Amino acid sequence: MAEKEIVLSGIRPTGNLHLGNYFGAVKNFIKMQHDTNAYFFIADYHSLTTHPTPGDLHGNVKQVLAEYLATGLDPELATIYVQSDLPETAELYLLLNMNAYIGELERTTSFKDKVRKQPENVNAGLLTYPVLMAADILIHKAKKVPVGKDQEQNLEMARKFAKRFNRIYNVEYFDEPIPYNFGEELVKVPGLDGSGKMGKSEGNGLYLIDDEKTIRKKVMKAKTDAGPTEPNSEKPQEIVNLFTLANIVSKPETVKFFNEAYSDCSIRYGDFKKQLAEDIVQFTMPIRERILSISADDAYLSKVVKMGAEKARESAVKTLKEVREIIGFRHF
Ligand code: ADP
Ligand code: TRP
């Protein structure tokens, strides 16, 4: 059997997972573990670019790791590690930095965004963020990277650095990493405030770690209108959003029932929300329990990251050795 190609994704250790993250990304990661030679790492070096003095770096990494494991990332199937456990990445970053130009880095959209958002902390790490990301990918010679819209340019830069390395040192060493497609339409999970999307910065998240009461409270507070007065009228955005969520978590019969009730104007939003809250709770509670038990199991977490780092170091050590040889470092 042909060997599965390496597909790699970095996860920023910033905050808890919400339903948007789960249905938009994590669910596909879980599938990806079966279809590819999947590598996942927690990007703790990267997190310093925006939070250079984190209050609890280790705690943040641990929380994110526990949440991803609880949702179904499987250390037996995928290589799961912490970025800073692989110092080879940092050395490749240093080497790639010599051929990354300030002008091109300054022109990236994410750098310009960050400069706008944190003008008091425009550090060199922020500028060279795409170089570190390229090092993450190239250190394993990963073939593909799943990227959302906001990461496309970073992947483009990684391709550029790979190509440039080959040209400058006159080798055909790195392949250009390309986007990995999950193979199905990506769902966009809406928020409960009538806005477009659920997101951390939108402040409208239903988190996997939320307890039952919190979920119910958030859902019951969801924005609704006065209700339909004409049969078969079109739904306003906030009601479409509720149905979109129901489509994701509820049984088809439930969605059908409330859809019909909407069409004949008999719908009671209170009942609809109660049912929706119930279905979300049914989905999130087992995950919440697993998050809590995994976060309390330091021995398990330590075993997972050790195993991941060991596996990841195999390709990292090899690549770095070859890169050093190509550039011309020799031992005396
Ligand atoms: P957040 O909005 O919580 O800051 P991130 O920007 O960190 O989310 O995104 C992490 C991953 O989750 C990305 O792959 C992104 O596409 C996905 N994601 C985030 N919010 C949603 C959403 N509402 N619907 C679908 N996918 C989402
Ligand atoms: N920049 C990515 C994000 O913000 C995280 C990341 C770091 C990453 N290194 C990576 C993603 C390498 C894919 C490959 O989400």
Image: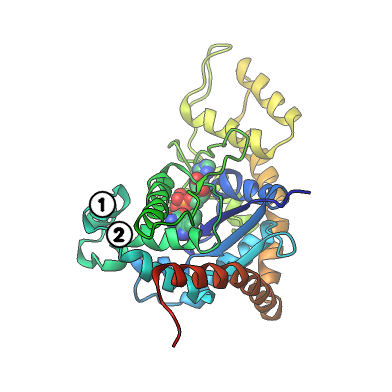
**Rendered-image quadrant of the C terminus:** bottom left
Residue 302: image x %, image y %? 65, 78
What residue lies at 51% left-to-right and 69% top-to-bottom? 322
Above or below 7: residue 44: below
Circles 2 and 1: CB atoms closer than 8 Å: yes
Q: Secondary structure at mark 1?
A: helix
Q: Is mark 2 within 8 Å of ligand 2?
A: no
In 3D space, how far apart are the residues under numbered discs 2 and 1 (Cα atoms)?
Answer: 8 Å
Relative depth, front residue between 253 and 149: 149
Residue at the extreme bottom: 332
Q: Which mark is residue 327?
A: none
Mark 2 is surrounded, within 10 Å at the Cα level, by few (under 14), some (14 to 19) or many (20 or more) other residues, namely some
Residue 163 in view in this figure: yes
Residue 148: image x %, image y %? 48, 44
Above or below 325: residue 105: above
What residue lies at 56% left-to-right and 43% top-to-bottom? 180
Residue 289: image x %, image y %? 71, 63
Residue 236: image x %, image y %? 47, 24
Q: Identify the amino acid type marked 1.
A: Glu
Relative depth, front residue between 135 and 209: 135
Q: Secondary structure at mark 2?
A: loop
279 left or right of 167?
A: right
Q: Which residue is mark 1?
A: 104
Q: Which residue is mark 2?
A: 100
State the image quarter where residue 8 is shown: bottom right
